[in-house]
């Protein structure tokens, strides 16, 4: 255990002792600490600091993104296109941040190409529709997180 974590555990234990708390759990982005104190006048303290790996932090952020996610829906029925033409790059990729007014896709309806634009700043979490497939009005196109 590093000195920083030891001092945190010690100060948390002192608070627990003063407030007569038997169990305490503290989490942050980098670590979590769980402390259980015997309350029958025994000095035994069990502390299990857990330092989070980059992988577990990334998974935690992904779970948080999923919890807070919303969707962008198709405004009309038509054919979904991820780019302006077959040889053009896609408008957005998963992980991109879109700004207000950015074109995110095209929906073709009755030979008219209708650009769908972002109405708020958001992170694209997942594309829910394949290129050149039919979509219905109000169908989910992208899973997003407002930023």
Image: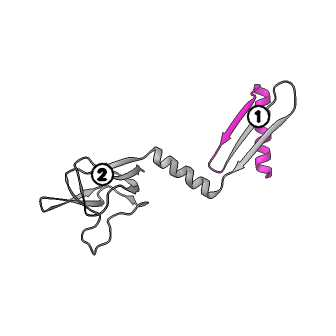
Tell whether 79 sits left or right of 67. left
What residue would you read off at disc 2?
A: 119
Q: Residue 15, relative to residue 80: is it above or below? A: above
Residue 146 on the magenta segment = no
Dot 2 crowding, Cα within 10 Å, few <14, some 14–19, many 20+: few
Residue 8 on the magenta segment = yes
Tag in front: 2 or 1:
1
- Residue 86 x %, y %: 26, 72
Q: Which residues are magenta?
A: 1-30
Tell whether 50 sits left or right of 97. right
Q: Residue drawn at (76%, 48%), measured in percent from left and top?
A: 5
Separation of residues labelled 2 and 1 (CA atoms): 49 Å
- Residue 130 x %, y %: 31, 61
Of residues 132 and 118, the one nearer the viewer is 132
Name the element at disc 2.
loop
Q: Are marks 2 and 1 in contact (CB under 8 Å)?
A: no
Q: Quadrant of residue 81?
A: bottom left
Q: Residue drawn at (20%, 51%), measured in percent from left and top?
A: 76
- Residue 42 x %, y %: 87, 28
Q: Quadrant of residue 40?
A: top right
Name the element at disc 1.
strand
Tell whether 124 sits left or right of 139. right
What residue would you read off at disc 1?
A: 36
Dot 1 crowding, Cα within 10 Å, few <14, some 14–19, many 20+: some
Q: Residue drawn at (35%, 48%), measured in percent from left and top?
A: 71
Give the mark nearest the N terminus, 2 or 1.
1
Q: Residue 68, relative to residue 15: is it above or below? A: below
Of residues 122 and 72, the one nearer the viewer is 72
Of residues 1 and 120, the one nearer the viewer is 1
Q: Residue 30, relative to residue 87: is it above or below? A: above
Tell whether 25 sits left or right of 143. right
Q: Residue drawn at (75%, 26%), measured in percent from left and top?
A: 19
């Amino acid at each position: 255990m590093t000195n920083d974590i030891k001092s945190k555990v010690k100060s948390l234990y002192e608070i627990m002792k003063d407030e007569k708390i038997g169990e305490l759990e503290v989490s942050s982005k980098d670590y979590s600490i769980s402390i259980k104190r015997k309350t029958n006048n025994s000095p035994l303290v069990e502390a299990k600091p857990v330092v989070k790996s980059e992988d577990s932090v990334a998974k935690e952020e992904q779970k948080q993104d999923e919890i807070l996610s919303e969707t962008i829906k198709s405004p009309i029925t038509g054919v979904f296109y991820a780019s302006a033409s077959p040889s053009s790059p896609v408008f957005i990729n998963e992980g991109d941040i879109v700004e207000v007014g950015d074109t995110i896709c095209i929906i073709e309806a009755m030979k008219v190409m209708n650009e769908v634009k972002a109405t708020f700043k958001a992170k694209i979490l997942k594309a829910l529709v394949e290129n050149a497939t039919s979509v219905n009005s109000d169908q989910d196109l992208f899973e997003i997180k407002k930023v």
